[in-house]
Amino acid sequence: MQNNALVVVDMLYDFIDGSLACHNADAAVTNTLKFIDLHTKDQGGEDHEILDTFPILFIRDHHPADHSSFKEQGGIWPSHCVAGTRGGEIHADLLPYASEELTFDKGCDRAVEQYSGFDGQNNAGQSLGEILELLDTSDVYVCGIATEYCVRNTCEDLLKAGFKVHLLSDCLAYVDAEGHRKALAEMAQEGIKVE
Ligand code: VGL
Ligand code: ZN
């Protein structure tokens, strides 16, 4: 039997209109909402009934102000997604679908870069993989930002953990268009279903 879940990676303001704004971010958010809507309608129910049969899990890049990936600390990125700032918040249109137990923060330790949602934890200290197992998930749909970094690393870890991974190509934003295309082609080679 197929048990679906949706994983929304880093659809946070700094990646949408902030310090690390990515290409296609507005369209990615709009299309993600359409995807959610479609599955809600399929079930003929109220908005949030989707959560029972099609859980939505959120990943958040969630850095301390002095994270080692920031340029001021010798890293490669502008300061972004600092915990407690607007830049680190989930887009308001998606927020109604987010719950604490299905939100996973990563990059919280200043010394460690974590691109994969698999490295995140919810407020009870549980990991994405653990929760997907508990939900008896077979198929994971993935959308988010950025294709080349957190989306890719999350998809590859999901695949390694044995899930069937469907990547929603209309629901992605990226740092670089060429890098995005290359990442999609390589992920498809690896067995990720780019849809
Ligand atoms: C990401 C750069 C730095 C991402 C996170 O979510 O793809 N990219 N931190
Ligand atoms: Zn980051």
Image (cartoon, rainbow, N blue to C red):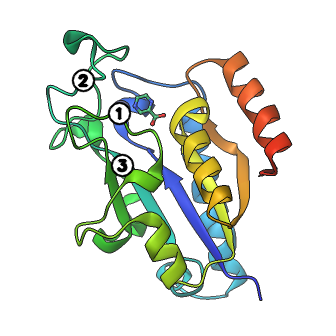
- The CA distance from mark 1 to mark 3 is 13 Å
Q: Give the residue drawn at x 71%, y 51%.
A: 167
Residue 177, placed above or below residue 87? above
Tell me the number on the disc at residue 113: 1
Vertical relation: 159 (above or below) 81: below
The circle drawn on residue 60 is: 3
**In the image, is the residue at mark 1 within 8 Å of ligand 2 by its beta carbon?**
yes
Closer to viewer: mark 1 or mark 3: 1
The disc placed on residue 68 is 2
Q: In this view, does 97 lie above or below 173?
A: below
Q: Which of 14 and 5 is in front in this view?
A: 5
Residue 65, picture quadrant: top left
- Identify the element where label 2 is drawn: loop
Q: Does residue 142 appear anywhere in the picture?
A: yes
For the residue labelled by badge 3, is the local secondary structure a helix, a strand or a loop?
Answer: strand
Q: Which of marks 3 and 2 is in front?
A: 2
Q: Answer with mark 3 or mark 2, whichever residue precedes in sequence.
A: 3
Residue 60, how many percent across, how many down? Answer: 36, 49
Q: Which amino acid does label 1 sit on?
A: Glu
Question: Viewed as shown, does residue 102 lie left or right of 168?
Answer: left
Mark 2 closeness class: few <14, some 14–19, many ≥20 residues within 10 Å: many
Q: Is residue 195 visible?
A: no
Q: Does the residue at mark 1 contact the one at mark 2 (Cβ under 8 Å)?
A: yes
Mark 3 is on which residue type? Answer: Arg
